[in-house]
Amino acid sequence: MDKKPRSDSKLDALPEARLLELRDGLLGSWSYADALSWLATECGVSSSPSALSSFYKRHCAPVLRERKQLAAVKAEVIGEMADKTDWDKASIESLKQMVFEFMANPLADTKEIERLFSLLLRRKDQELDERKLRLVEDKAAEAKRQLEAAMSKAKAKGGLSEETLQEIEAAAGLL
């Protein structure tokens, strides 16, 4: 169970703007030494590492939990988008894990990360569509080749026999 802050807690008594600045600094790249130095120079408050640790538990840890929950939700959403592709399950799980790790980072811009992975999904879909198009083009080229061969055979025989017409229909059926 979380302890309540002391009634004389200097850190919790900071003005809201300063309190948020301290929280964001700790969530960013500040070490405790940096935070204590900032408190002393900018706020005129002396504090201890243990008081800072208690402050972190009360103000920073909930923000980190919320970010991780949001990251998990966003990873699932992007995973669901990936499920609509022809990706294998291992690739989708890997993508979801990468999204979670990027978004759980306190310095990450979640909108940019979401945009990046959406672009990645669209690019992968485009690659699959291009591959499907090449297969269809190859199939059409093969059908055209067979149709031309059947027509040449018909011309060589001097006309279109029933057998030749069936070959042409079969070749045309590939289209």
Image (cartoon, rainbow, N blue to C red):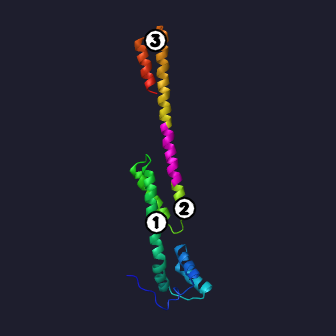
* Snapshot quadrant of residue 29: bottom right
User: Quick one: label 1 or label 2, which is nearer the N terminus?
Assistant: 1
Do the CB atoms of the residues marked 1 and 3 lie less than 8 Å apart? Answer: no
Give the number of the disc on residue 111: 2
- Secondary structure beneath label 3: loop
In the orientation shown, which residue stands out farthest toward the top?
A: 158
**Bounds of the magenta span?**
118-132
- Which residue lies at the image location 46% right of the left edge and 87% below the top edge? 5
Do the CB atoms of the residues marked 1 and 2 lie less than 8 Å apart? Answer: no
Q: Amino acid at mark 2?
A: Lys
Q: Nearer the viewer, mark 2 or mark 3?
A: 3
Q: Is residue 127 magenta?
A: yes
- Which residue lies at the image location 47% right of the left edge and 85% below the top edge? 50
Q: Main secondary structure of the magenta part?
A: helix
In the orientation shown, which residue stands out farthest toward the right?
A: 42
Q: Amino acid at mark 3?
A: Leu
Q: Is residue 16 magenta?
A: no
- Which residue lies at the image location 51% right of the left edge and 43% below the top edge? 127
Q: Is residue 157 above or below residue 89?
A: above
Which residue is the site of mark 3? Answer: 160
User: Quick one: label 1 or label 3, which is nearer the N terminus?
Assistant: 1
Which residue is the site of mark 1? Answer: 70
Inter-mark Cα distance, 2 to 3: 65 Å
